[in-house]
Image (cartoon, rainbow, N blue to C red):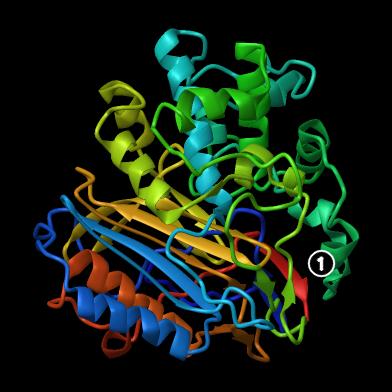
Amino acid sequence: MISRRFRSSGRRTAAVLTAMGALLAAGTLATPATAAATPGGLDRQALRESLDAVHEAGMYGIYSDVRDGDGTWRGASGVADVGTRRPVRPGMVHRVGSITKTFTSVAILQQVARGAVELDAPVGRYLPGLIPGERGRQITVRMLLNHTSHIADYIGPAFPSLLEGSTTSLDDNRFRTFTPEELAKLGLGAAPTGEPGAVPGRYSNTNYVLAGLLLEKVTGEDAERYITRNVIRKAGLRHTSFPRTPHIPGSHSKAYESWFGLIDPPRDYSVYNMSWAGTAGAVTSTMDDLNRFYRALLRGELIGAAQLAEMQKTVVVLAGGGQMDYGLGLYYLDLPCGRFWGHDGGVFGMGTQSLSSPDGTRQISFALNLMKYQTIDENGNLEPSPIDFALGDHLLLALCGQSAPTAKSSGTPFVPLPADRLSVKR
């Protein structure tokens, strides 16, 4: 999305990326929901050139899937492996991070439709042993899904070196298995970020780990298996899964992490135990599958109209130093040509964005294989990279056509902001 620059809490301090990323919407390109409809047609040559421009600006590899009605354009530019120079391909499987949250939310709302879960019921009703007492009575299921529970994120406690200006935790935990209960307790054990239900909310991956545990409680089965059968398969997705090993299934790119220059040269984290992300961010998918998923969701093929309306009731949520209009595992972004719904995701070395028009006719999903490539200035501000302006141009061209302003001319780059919403020392 078109992003704001963000400021961290202290000098030489920067926000960093978690399992679930957020590319935060804002900037001068945002427009009211009543903006003109998205223009028809796909300029394939321009899309190709704009994707190449992202690679030429410094991104190792990018692949993108754009749809306009029945028309589809798929492209890739750059390399999947900087050593062998193996090229990226449009159909590669990718870790999509926090886009997993939409899948998990859909599963919960299916249970709402069945009467097994009430959105405004206290979570203590479903998880009394995990969230007991007053907290369990005050926090509702809805508050988990829209990040107004103010339960802290577990990323800091799970990867403590990130709070100390070191990335050693990334390597120490490469093959560690975290249980959902362990992650939930790490978040619940930290100081709350506010009172339950208070707006603005605070983005926290702990909310969606708890949502997965709640899903297991009411269905009696493993949450990832339930989501696979009732969401992924129902949507007809052929290349989307929760991998059971540290490897990405199928043809895929490597995943290069720079961590704002702390890892130089960027290191490959494509082999990684994703139990640390679980129902908050462990899904792998292709860009075509993501477009199919959001199209099915917005057209009422996965949940009913009443449940989709609940997903699209938004509140302001703070994340990464910016804010977004967040519903239940879904947010919207207003562009010059209209409103688009979706989510983004970021894990170590991989970033993803998926956006769709309200009727699912105009869509983009794209993936990056190099993360946190930007620099941090001495005041702790993120300095946008030429990559970010090129990403903005590709996004606007894909969704709004040639009439859209460029990111460079408007001065609003598309910055994949860090998603762990932590402050770390540099």
Relative to 28, residue 362 above or below: above
Front in this rendered view, residue 49 or 172: 49
Q: Is residue 146 visible?
A: no
Residue at numbered disc 1: 163
Q: Quadrant of the C terminus?
A: bottom right
Q: Residue at x 21, y 73 (%)?
A: 44
Residue 196, position in %: x, y? 60, 35
Q: Quadrant of the N terminus?
A: bottom left
- Please indicate whether residue 220 sits to the left or right of residue 234 in the image: right
Q: Which picture quadrant has residue 165? A: bottom right
Q: Is residue 97 visible?
A: yes
Q: Judging from the image, what secondary structure is the residue with disc 1 in?
A: helix
Three-letter code for the amino acid on which mark 1 is drawn: Leu
For disc 1, the neighbor class at 10 Å (few under 14, some 14 to 19, many from 20) is: some
- Please indicate whether residue 394 sits to the left or right of residue 104 in the image: left
Residue 243, position in %: x, y? 67, 42
Q: Residue at x 11, y 64 (%)?
A: 41
Front in this rendered view, residue 412 or 94: 94
Residue 219, position in %: x, y? 60, 13
- Please indicate whether residue 346 sits to the left or right of residue 324 in the image: right
